[in-house]
Image: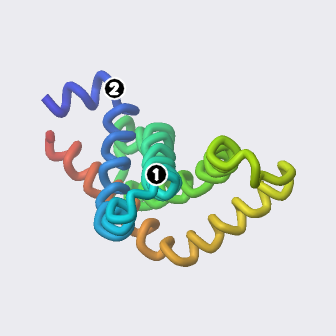
């Protein structure tokens, strides 16, 4: 059945695969304090937006793992590229979300973009050591599952 989904909708499968892989560390690391404090803004900014970005990046960049015969190393690198792509996708998502959620505190568009890029650069330094290899491992595992017949 998995192989049928891979053939019919490889982008959906790849997007869902990488979204789940991205949710695992978020659910262990960030979700408990957010749920405990019942902070909706933090939930949207720290959980939902990164998951949406990871799913979209996985759909766009990770589908190649399903559509081509990639070796293990290339699948790992493609998966790390999905993680990096999701960080890049977060820049416009955070900018839009910050205006929608806090319209009174939003400055000029240039200020918002600079603040967002700086925040994501810090996030990449703080959590990139975890998410880039995790994306690589997710890509490698996806390639192995597909190669073995699901």
Q: Above or below — where is 37 with respect to 113? A: below
Residue 103 in the figure: left or right of residue 137: right
| Residue under numbered circle 1 | 40
Closer-to-camera residue (95/90): 95
Residue 110 in the figure: left or right of residue 99: right
Closer to the chain start, of discs 2 and 1, is 2
- Callout 2: SS: loop
Label at residue 9? 2
- Callout 1: SS: helix
- Number of other residues with Cα within 10 Å of mark 1, as a class: few under 14, some 14 to 19, many 20 or more: few
Closer-to-camera residue (96/33): 33
Closer-to-camera residue (93/61): 93
The alpha-carbon separation of the residues under discs 2 and 1 comes to 32 Å
The percent position of residue 132, horizontal first and vertical second, equals: 46, 66
The percent position of residue 80, horizontal first and vertical second, equals: 46, 60
Residue 26 visible in the shown view: no
Seen at 43% across and 43% down, the residue is 55
Tag nearer the camera, 2 or 1: 1
Q: Quadrant of residue 58?
A: top left
Q: Above or below — where is 25 with respect to 144? A: below
- Number of other residues with Cα within 10 Å of mark 2, as a class: few under 14, some 14 to 19, many 20 or more: some
Q: Above or below — where is 81 with respect to 65? A: below
Residue 21 visible in the shown view: yes
Seen at 83% across and 58% down, the residue is 111
């Amino acid at each position: 059945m998995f192989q049928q989904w891979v053939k019919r909708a490889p982008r959906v499968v790849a997007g869902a695969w990488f979204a789940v892989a991205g949710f695992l560390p978020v659910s262990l690391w960030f979700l408990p304090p957010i749920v405990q404090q019942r902070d909706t803004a933090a939930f949207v900014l720290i959980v939902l937006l990164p998951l949406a970005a990871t799913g979209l990046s996985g759909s766009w960049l990770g589908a190649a793992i399903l559509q081509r015969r990639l070796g293990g190393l290339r699948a790992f690198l493609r998966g790390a590229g999905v993680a990096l792509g999701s960080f890049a996708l977060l820049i416009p998502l955070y900018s839009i979300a910050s205006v929608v959620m806090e319209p009174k505190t939003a400055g000029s568009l240039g200020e918002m973009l600079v603040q967002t890029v700086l925040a994501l650069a810090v996030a990449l330094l703080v959590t990139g050591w975890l998410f880039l290899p995790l994306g690589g491992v997710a890509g490698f595992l996806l390639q192995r599952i597909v190669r073995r017949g699901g």
